[in-house]
Image (spheres, rainbow, N blue to C red):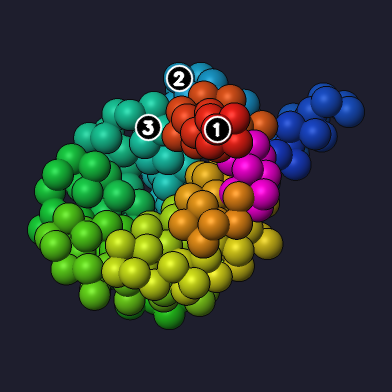
Amino acid sequence: MLHLRRHILLLLAGVLVCAVTVAPISSANRTSADIHFTNGLIYYALGFHDMAIKELQQAAASDLGDTEVRVALGMAYHAKGDWQAALGAYGEALRIDDSLLHVHGLMGDIYRAQGDRENARAHYLMALEDPELVAVPCYGLGILAEEAGDRKAAVERYRQVLDSAPGHAESAARLAVLLHEDGAVDEALEVIENAQRYSPRSAELHYLGGVLYMEMEDYDKAEHAFDRAVQLDGSHDGARRALRQLESQRDK
């Protein structure tokens, strides 16, 4: 999706990083705002958030009506953990163009992280007014429903996410856990295996698959799943413990 978490910014930044590696970017026929925006995207892609913010601030000051710059600036603040500054940048973008519904999804994430469920829900619902936006707001609404104890609503929201973005590992993991807790082991495993086709490098999906295989007493598949989780994330304590448990059972 074009708008989902503004992945286009990351894609563009990645392309620019490759281009800079091959040859310096010429400043000919480019405005100061363009140059700062490009630099900001590159720094953002490289994880240099302070430098990205500095460049994007200059780009925003040079072009007072550019919403893309302000969304990118908000994302840089967001990545750094400066939530209030991120909300300010997102708010500026919406004041310039209130049709940018994807920005509400980003704001909902911040309010949810701050524990402001009411504002988070309101922004997620505004984001859902765009039929192309599903994953970010529905995932956020699913978490809010879980926190409120509404498991049925949470399951519905996570299913909505996976219908739109089948590789959304976080939604698949949360949905599988809820289904498992309700005793629907086969369905939970189906959710995990479907998501793995799109997100094969998610350690958590492999770990949860291993848990489900263990419950089904398919120990070879369980061991393979836990081993793969550890390969992908060496610090995954759950997978390491599960492997030790399997080894102990075999020794006995």
- Horizontal placement of 47 versus 23: left or right? left
Q: Nearer the viewer, mark 1 or mark 3?
A: 1
In this view, 154 is above or below 66: below
Part of the protein shown in magenta: 220-228
The image quarter in which residue 118 lies? bottom left
* Label whose residue precedes the other's in the sequence (3 or 2): 2
Above or below: residue 31 compared with residue 8: above
**Secondary structure beneath disc 1?**
loop
- Name the residue tied to disc 1: 252
Q: Position of residue 246 (x, y in %)?
A: 55, 37
Q: Decide whether the magenta segment is chiefly helix, strand or loop.
A: helix
- Residue type, label 2: Asp
**Residue at 60%, 50% in the rendered image:** 219
Q: To which residue does mark 2 refer?
A: 50
- Quote the CA–CA distance across marks 3 and 2: 8 Å
- In the displayed structure image, the side of residue 101 where residue 213 appears, left or right: right
State the residue at coordinates (60%, 67%).
194
Mark carried by residue 77? 3
Determine the CA span between mark 1 and mark 3: 53 Å
Residue 69 in percent (x, y) is at 48, 43
Tag nearer the camera, 1 or 2? 1
